[in-house]
Image: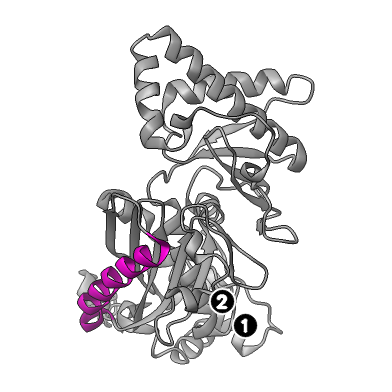
Amino acid sequence: MSTFAASGRASGRTTTVACAAALHALGEATLSELASATGLSRPTVKERLAELPHLVEITSGAEHGESPTPCGGRPAARFRFRGRHGFVIGAEIGKHDQRILVCDISGRILHVGRYHDTGARSGRDRISALRGRLDRVVTDLQANHGSWIGLGISLTGGIGPDGRVSYAPHYPDLEGLSPAEAGLAFGKVPLIVEHDLNAAALAEHAYGAARGADTFALALAWHELAAGIVLDGRIYRGSRNLAGELNLIDDGLSAPAHWGDVESFLPILEAAHRGDPRRQEEVEAFAARAARHIAYLTLAIDPELVVLGGPLAHHRTLIELITARLHAMMSKAYPVKLAVTEHPAFGPALGALQLALTHAFGNLLGDPSFPARIDVQSLHSAV
């Protein structure tokens, strides 16, 4: 069992947070179970949980079919997070797709939404569409799940050190705007905006292929590399928030026009899979270029692991070609440990949701490092 120990000299706030963290991790527990998890006495646990009436509710063990004690006493009371205190939202604004995830403060997924918008639209149009969707989601949730207490947005493009959109390859009309000026703010709801690959890397670190790795990269399986980088367990951004953006390098090697987006490149992959020799040669060239960029990134940061993400990450033939090319290029160094994302569709939205939930608990408990967790099993079943 995980422990959330607090030393005997720890402050009341520290022990309160330890009790809250243990209960959040266990989902529901008795005083004895929480005392065991925290190393605190039962009376101390009870006192600390009493400080959180807005977050913690008590249920009778009898509700769970527990029998009275051998002496005829009532079943032990059980504690759980009051999920209806509030909910948080994580959303992704992609080139054509928008994804929305909602969870309550216990980490239970309440809503999973995926939307596809065809055609060329401005960034403001995409944000307007997202606002309409969020308004409808919030209206449906507020009656049964409390207040909206946090919003995380993952955005294709960069957020500069000044908090403004530094570049947005799909939405140039957003460049230079603050999140509020772009229309992403919703009243007093706390807002966090993150680069989509950074958010996806956070999701992979907490719930995916990078669990247990403190230094890794979440890299697009693409001929122009962009990556979210985690060093020592934290997102690495660089001095201008451009770390990992190898796609911004103009190396003078022009790519065919139909390599410009996934939709136009997929027919090439399909033709290569059917045995078209010309298309097979083209896919090999694509993979070689992707592998070269991954090799540059790998030797720059020396990660434990590189996780391949993006819409092509589960295309087996392409990944095998990239892997073979990468290992050949790295033969003088070391074999690169590769993995494929476990969250190909909802990674950026899940990372944004995690950021929003952690920030919400920071506000509720005064501890920005509170280990908030999301029940991703329910996300998998919903998807």
Q: Which residue is denoted by mark 2 in the rendering? A: 18
Please check the rendered image and state whether residue 302 is part of the magenta-colored stretch, yes or no.
Answer: no
Q: Is there any visible trace of residue 247 in the rendered image?
A: yes
**Amino acid beneath label 2:** Ala
Q: Is there any visible trace of residue 20 in the rendered image?
A: no
Direction from residue 75 to residue 356 in the image, left or right: right
User: Element type at marker 1?
Assistant: helix
Task: Report crowding for label 1: few under 14, some 14 to 19, many 20 or more residues within 10 A (C-alpha).
Answer: some
**Amino acid beneath label 1:** Thr
Where is residue 107? Give x, y as percent. 38, 67
Direction from residue 288 to residue 54 in the image, left or right: left
Q: Is residue 125 above or below residue 302?
A: below
Residue 14: assigned label: 1
Which image quadrant for residue 264? top left
Where is residue 176? Give x, y as percent. 58, 69
Task: Report crowding for label 2: few under 14, some 14 to 19, many 20 or more residues within 10 A (C-alpha).
Answer: many
Q: CA distance from mark 2 to mark 1?
A: 6 Å
Q: Is residue 311 above or below residue 158?
A: above
Q: Looking at the image, which is closer to me, 293 or 208? A: 293
Where is residue 331? Give x, y as percent. 74, 19
User: Element type at marker 2?
Assistant: helix
Residue depicted at x 60% and y 46%: 227
Residue depicted at x 43% and y 38%: 261
Circles 2 and 1 in contact, beta carbons < 8 Å: yes
Q: What type of secondary structure mainly makes up the magenta span? A: helix
Q: Is residue 336 above or below residue 152?
A: above
Which image quadrant for residue 274? top left
Q: Is residue 353 above or below residue 247?
A: below
Q: Looking at the image, which is closer to me, 251 or 337? A: 251
Q: Looking at the image, which is closer to me, 103 or 197? A: 197
Q: Which residues are magenta?
A: 122-145
Please check the rendered image and state whether residue 137 is part of the magenta-colored stretch, yes or no.
Answer: yes
